[in-house]
Amino acid sequence: MDEHLSVGPVGSTFFGQTLEQHLLHMQRQQAGATGDFTGLFHQIALAAKIIASQVSKAGLANILGLTGDVNVQGEEVMKLDVFANTTLVRCVQQGGHVCVMGSEEVAEPIPVPPQFPKGKYVLQFDPLDGSGNIDINASIGTIFSVHRRKTAGNGPGTLEDCLQPGRDIVAAGYVIYGSSNMFVYSAGQGVHGFTFDPAIGEFFLSHENLRIPKRGDTYSVNEGNYHKWSDGVRAWVDWIKKDEPSRSAYRLRYIGAMVADFHRTLLRGGIFAYPSDRKNASGKLRLLYEASPLAFVCEHAGGAASDGQQRIVDILPTALHQRTPLYIGSPDDVADALRFVG
Ligand code: P6P
């Protein structure tokens, strides 16, 4: 047969496998799958494409928006993280796949409006993490996690449905808006990365079965907090940036958006940390829609994630916006850190 007629990998095009084809292929592997999960992911991916489009012209919108709240196209100039939040809610709420949502941008759980069916999943997200990086054109991201509802029935979900530990996550992932836009997720069967082709408007599989190196050579922490840290955290940082008999000093990399710092750590190895300090006694990062989803992804790539005392995914949440210290990355690098801070 002519080679150009060959079928190629399952669900692939000339450009490789799209996210949608990948999800459909995974669905077919799950006996009894209803398509709910696939439908929810399609909505999350659509929201990601819309957010990516707006993020890519954020600077432009700011210039054009100088005349006030409405830019020259007559569009309302929204704060980008409010736009991202609204986009995710609008893309997901009508699909009938979730019973409740939780967002970094909204104080209380977000109910599904009465006119829409309620589904079996709970979606929580930080719609635009690191948004302070927007006006300096540095990478930012969206972080999300999916649980099954805990409360009985098929009515509206509740706060109880949101307050679930990372170990019960069904799927989690992030979108990084950077030099290229990538969608990275795990549903417990490996971690897979998809790169967005804006000319086609699709995410294509580019990083199948991502595995984090056992050890890296970079550490990522805001050293500006050095004098607010505990003695243990300071001792760890002093140690990691010194040459040791078995290894050279680690290099410091810190972008200031956790999605970007975590993505580099996932691909290259090393450790990202946001320790607690005198100002942030419980840490700065949020558990449910920042630390927990990334901990789930990291562990499914062979990495580790701890609050300094226990696995992030074992923490039982008690509040929607609770914070946690975070040490996440290569297993050997996280173990080293815990020897000092644990
Ligand atoms: P700092 C962004 O605001 C964020 O929530 C994370 O994405 C990032 O890792 C952290 O805060 C940066 O905090 O205190 O170093 O500016």
Image (spheres, rainbow, N blue to C red):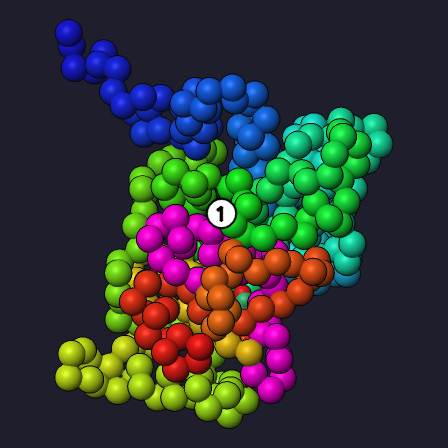
Crowding at mark 1 (Cα within 10 Å: few <14, some 14-19, many 20+): many
Please give left or right for residue 5 compared with residue 180 in the image: left
Q: For this rendering, which residue is in front, 129 or 157?
A: 157
Q: Give residue 9's position: percent from left, percent from top.
A: 27, 23
Pointer 1 residue Cβ closer than 8 Å to ligand 1: no
Residue 94 shows up from this direction: no
Residue placed under numbered mark 1 in the picture: 173
Q: Is residue 297 magenta?
A: yes
- Amino acid type at circle 1 is Gly
Q: Residue at x 43, y 41 (%)?
A: 188
Q: Is residue 123 magenta?
A: no
Q: How many marks?
A: 1
Q: Residue at x 61, y 63 (%)?
A: 286
Label 1: state its secondary structure: strand
Q: For this rendering, which residue is in front, 230 or 152?
A: 152
Residue 188 shows up from this direction: yes
